[in-house]
Amino acid sequence: MDRVTHGWSGSIKQFLESPSSLIEASLEAHNFGLFNHGTSQSQIEAWIEEIELLRRSFRDLAIVNPESIKWSVIFEYELPLEGGRRPDAIILAPNQLVVLEFKQDPGLQRSQIDQVNAYARDLSEYHSRTHGLKVVPILVPTKLTDIEIIKDDVQILSPDRIPIFFSKIENGNPMNLEDWLEGDYAPLPTLIAAAKMIFNHQDLPSIKRAKSAGVQDAVDTLRLVANKSRIEGKRSLAFVSGVPGAGKTLVGLQFVYAESGIESQAIFLSGNAPLVEVLRDALQNKTFVRDLHAFIKSYGTTSKIPIQNIIVFDEAQRAWDSNHMMNKKGIPLSEPELLVNIAEKIPNWSTLVGLIGHGQEINTGEEAGVPGWYLALRDKPGIEDWHIYMPPRYCKDFPNLTVHEIPEFDLTITLRSKQAEFLHEWVHELLDGRLNKAAEIADKIRYQNFPIFVTRDLDLAKNYLLGMYSGQKEKRFGLLASSKDNFLPQVGINNGFQETKLTKYSR
């Protein structure tokens, strides 16, 4: 029998007729099933207050609109794959879904507004039976009266204003409760969660946004490239590019996993040491994911030959040029040259796959970008044994070489929430110093209710996060601290070399 994914549900009529004690018992049982421990007294008191407030509201509403008793209410709906996130109540009304979040605090907090807004956003984007419905987020400060305002698309209503709000909803046929509960809720998991699912032989959630982004098409095409190299005994270089959040790393991990053990070995390399550490810890495996620079040192500067035929490396546009390699390692060759040399040492055949982020060269020594790979191949003896595959946008960077244009290797749709689709553009314009352009994009971001705040009060930022993710044990958030910042130690953040070196990113 499937586990119930909510605390209680029923029509408004059933809600008004059911004893409060039965609803409370159902909520407690669901909470125990979710967290395997009893419910705190404060949570029980909050439920009692919410139930009574909604009872009064729907009794008043039923007098002015008898049809409203056909609507449905869902308490504590558990958002799957979301680490226990649960809106307090969801109302299925005609042509719309209303998300209610009750707060007992005497004052309004920014984090509370963003929390209910996030619930509404995620239900709208990821719940299959909510597509096409108007989704209204409502924050209810239970200790206040005579409040009816709108803040960033969130209705803020004191309890006495709830019946008035619902009375304005036009009559019609509300969504069927059972149909809605049976709908799929399928957010794309985080990279770490997705990696664990892949390596535990689990299917990733399938959402419309992910399908349209072409992630699986890119993986399938890479497998065709590798198979062609395997059959023909050739070398191949393929690039997969994409905007931030388009799923490039996910493509690389899926490809490595799919190809491992199929008459070959495959490895995923990244120069991002924290990412390597986190992925290794999450997968409990050090074979599939390795540090890029350590791999190059092991096989690019010695006669050793790797056992892998397939080498996937993340952020290929950030590979070090020859000057940087000389300064850092005393080696007069670029990382692209060294990786190409490694691939040519591998017996029989090999496939290199570079994952490219658009405009993400961020450190000194990364200025060569994609053209650095052209220089690594241009004068190579035996270049005729190489097959090169890339998105059309990069073909111009490889003049006089035979290049296969692969549109499937250009991921142009971000898998992040559509509220964040302009975020990478804003960062790009800001870092390039085009502040007027960045300001224009910031207006778009604000319009889409993607919360970005600036504060010089660290405690204020911490309190916001703690409030936003209260009770969500699986949520991860943190601080990016520059080692060049001289102010951080004054607020208790030690960003020196030793402190940074000792940081455990996987914990």
Image (spheres, rainbow, N blue to C red):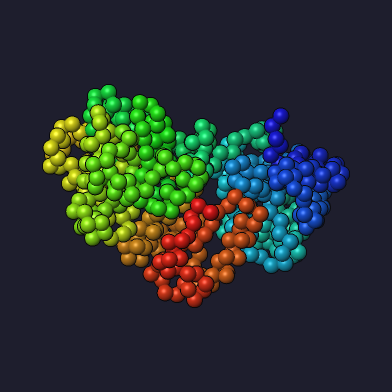
Marker count (numbered):
0
The image shows residue 242, relative to residue 160, as above or below, that is above
Residue sitting at 69 percent across and 32 percent down? 2
| Residue 306 sits above or below residue 120 on the image | above
Using the rendered image of the protein, determine whether residue 296 is visible from the camera's viewpoint: yes
Furthest-front residue in view? Answer: 303
Give x and y (percent) for residue 178: 70, 33
Residue projecting furthest to the top: 231
| Residue at 28% over, 43% down | 299
Viewport quadrant of the N terminus: top right
Q: 3 or 131, which lies in front?
A: 3
* Picture quadrant where residue 230 is located: top left
The foreground one among 503 and 156 is: 503
- In percent of width and height, residue 373 lies at 22, 45
In the picture, measured across the screen, residue 35 lies left or right of residue 441, that is right
Where residue 244 appears, as percent x and y from the top left, is 39, 49
Q: What's the residue at 44%, 68% (across, down)?
A: 495
Along the viewing direction, whichever of 244 and 417 lies nearer the viewer: 244
Is 317 in front, or is 45? 317
Looking at the image, which residue is at 61% across and 47% down?
A: 83
Can you say whether 104 is above or below 489 in the image?
above
Residue 60 point in image, percent of width and height = 81, 51
From where the camera sits, is residue 111 visible? no
